[in-house]
Amino acid sequence: MRNRMPGSASLESKSHTLLTALSVSVTPMVEIVTKTPFGARCQTADKRHVESVDLDRMIRELTERHPDWAELRDAIDLAIKAHEGQHRKTGDPYVTHPIAVASIVSEWGLDRDSVVSAVLHDVVEDTPVGLGDIRDLFGESVSNIVDGLTKLDGIKLVEGVEPVDAKSAANLQKLLLSMSAEPRVLIVKLADRLHNIRTLDGLEEEKARRVARETMDVHAQLARKLGMTHVATELEDECFKTLYPARYRELRTQTKNRMALGRERLERVIQDTRAALDVAGIKAVVTGRRKHLWSVYEKMITKQRSLEDIYDLVGLRVIVQKEADCYLALGVIHALYTPVPGRFKDWIASPKFNMYQSLHTTVLADRDTMEVQIRTLGMHEVAEWGIAAHWSYKSGENPEVAWLGRLDGDISNPLSYLEHVKSELGRDEVYCFTPRGDVMALASGSTCVDFAYAVHTEVGNRCRGAKVNSVLVPLSHVLKNGDRVEIVTGGDGTPLKEWLSFAVSSKARSKIRTQTTSDRERHAVSDGRSQLAEAVGRLGVPQRVLRPDGMERAAKHMGFPSRDDLLRAIGRDEADADTAAKIIAGVTSPVAPVGRDEENNNLSEHVAVEGSLSWVVIRSRCCKPVTGDRIVGLVVGVETAEIHRDGCSIYKRDGDESRFVEVSWLGDSAAQRVEITIEAIDRDGLLSEVAGVISGRKIPIVASNTDTGNDMIARERFLIKVGDISQLNSLLDAIRDVKGVFDARRS
């Protein structure tokens, strides 16, 4: 392990328990471990906002952790004075936030300048304290980190009320590229965002959702790229809970139930594995690990699988003493359980660029398919905490953040550039070799053309063929980990437009487009139309949505005079095809109406108009009230009233109070058609089970329609006949109890 900076010594003591287990005996650990074994290091991660924050305690704990850091005490004093009178949305004194962020950074084992910068990260933006004051008091290093954090705070990272502007895109690009030299800005920013996410309850719902979306798209991906898995998973799960609360609750319930059923089996596997390793003389700590909820949901979406088809909800983690023990433990486990072919990865021999190392294998253990991770204590620390676990800024080299160079790109279209950043952050990586043995990190899905442009622009422009592992392949060949790639060059240095159909990196696509500008201009509209069609296809909706009116609507929304202007901009990559497609298609696949209500809605025998028994009463088609609903009557003709549910939007459309009459239900009930909508996590048998609940209550089903989007959420609509509101409410309650259902409501 690397030598640590001042302040990280505590991390060593925090690992003492696990080290003791490894050096003395195999410690009984049968519980599913969801957090890193470095218990003390995770104290901050487990803290949540409470109504009364003890500021004195927070300061005492932070300063006692670093008693020799006089600069820290000075920074705290300055922050308290600068933020005096300021409060957070939670009602707490504002200074509690930077102190909490500094505590997180300290728990991660970062150096003194990082912790001090965390304490001061908001003073320049929110108080009269200037950057020059920070530099004079705490030095250039702290000043640079605070400056980077201040600039990053002023950048819009998601589309909100106001569009992302060119200045924000340019600043974001500069900052991301400069952070390869000073990654502490990113790390402190992640700590800042982590504390904000833990205290989202203090924000209005809309603001909380906007923060959660930005965090999910950018900050969680940055944490994962930096190898800070523990931070990424907490951010993702907290954002999942905020963005999709009903889905989160239902998935949590389902996964909890599944894991409860398999707990005895998991404990048996842990005990058997531990015993086999002990017999082989390998000292190890064997624990269960649980897949976090967002990862489960994401896998359902990307793999298009139901929850029942995901077998790695729990797995094994084996932590050993030495690297050689990893391979010995692998042999023991493969002898004990049947390995699944094609599911072995050696990240020890070939670490990821964020320095992640581990052996991954999947085995059939006690009738369950289970992933096993095998690593040393040092590898585990890096796997959980990434760059923060092995901080070494004095070297001036940070290979863990080399991927930041891929975030360069064309900023002429700010929104498009932002989508590019999000896309790059979300991509996995493949590692390939040049003929000289140099490692090239590329985005997952990269082709030989992407590799050529990664080597050099001229190599890309002049590439005409490629050899992968000494075998000739087309330039469209998708590269895999460990491939040795040789580019064959020739010609006049002009790339082919066809390469755009398989090039995935922004650099390759940008250079290809630049060289083919004149040709692209002539075909921009047709290219835009093709890209838009592809984007619509990715949404899973029919191509027939690409009607002129829909494209005109998208053009107007995105600020273009006409649909041809929009198509031309898409063809030039000046507008985002996916954004236009979502506007045209309504974001998600629409669920078609379940059927038209052709029944005579005359309710004269069941509803009375106050003061008269001769009125004709008809049921509205907009809100479809049923017996027992609070209703009002709208005069629509001579002694003819249309009844609406109290609160119907008819009030907004018709402000003439003289047109409304008092109406009431008579004693008897009439069977009336009602449309209900059910949303659920998709699984086999869901439709039949919901239909069974309805028919089991003797409620007729007139029509039904089901749609499952790319998000693996099933949306079912039923047109049914009910007698009154109590029967309807009872039915909806029963449907909500069906496994996987998180919402059942009247349409």
Image (tube, rainbow, N blue to C red):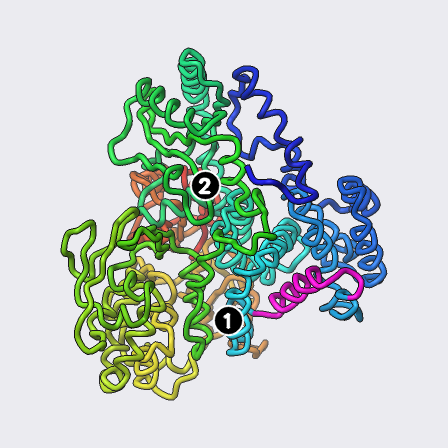
Quarter of the image for residue 490 reads bottom left
Residue 148, position as x, y percentages in the image: 63, 65
Which label sits in the foreground, 2 or 1? Answer: 2
Relative to 268, say whether 15 is above or below: below
> Could you tell me what secondary structure mostly forms the magenta stretch?
helix
Q: Which dot marks residue 221? A: none
Instruction: Give the magenta part as a residue range.
Output: 136-155
Quarter of the image for residue 734 reads top left
Q: Residue furthest bottom?
A: 561
218 and 597: which is toward the camera: 218
Q: Which dot marks residue 650? A: 1
SS at mark 1 in the image = helix
Q: Which amino acid does label 1 sit on?
A: Ile
Say which residue appears at 80% left-offset and 71% top-offset. Answer: 128
According to the picture, the residue beneath numbered tag 2 turns out to be: 251
Say which residue appears at 68% left-offset and 45% top-offset. Answer: 106
Say which residue appears at 24% left-offset and 32% top-offset. Answer: 341
47 and 337: which is toward the camera: 337
Residue 633 in sight here: yes
Relative to 17, say whether 600 is above or below: below
Q: Which residue lies furthest to the left in this view?
A: 472
285 and 164: which is toward the camera: 285
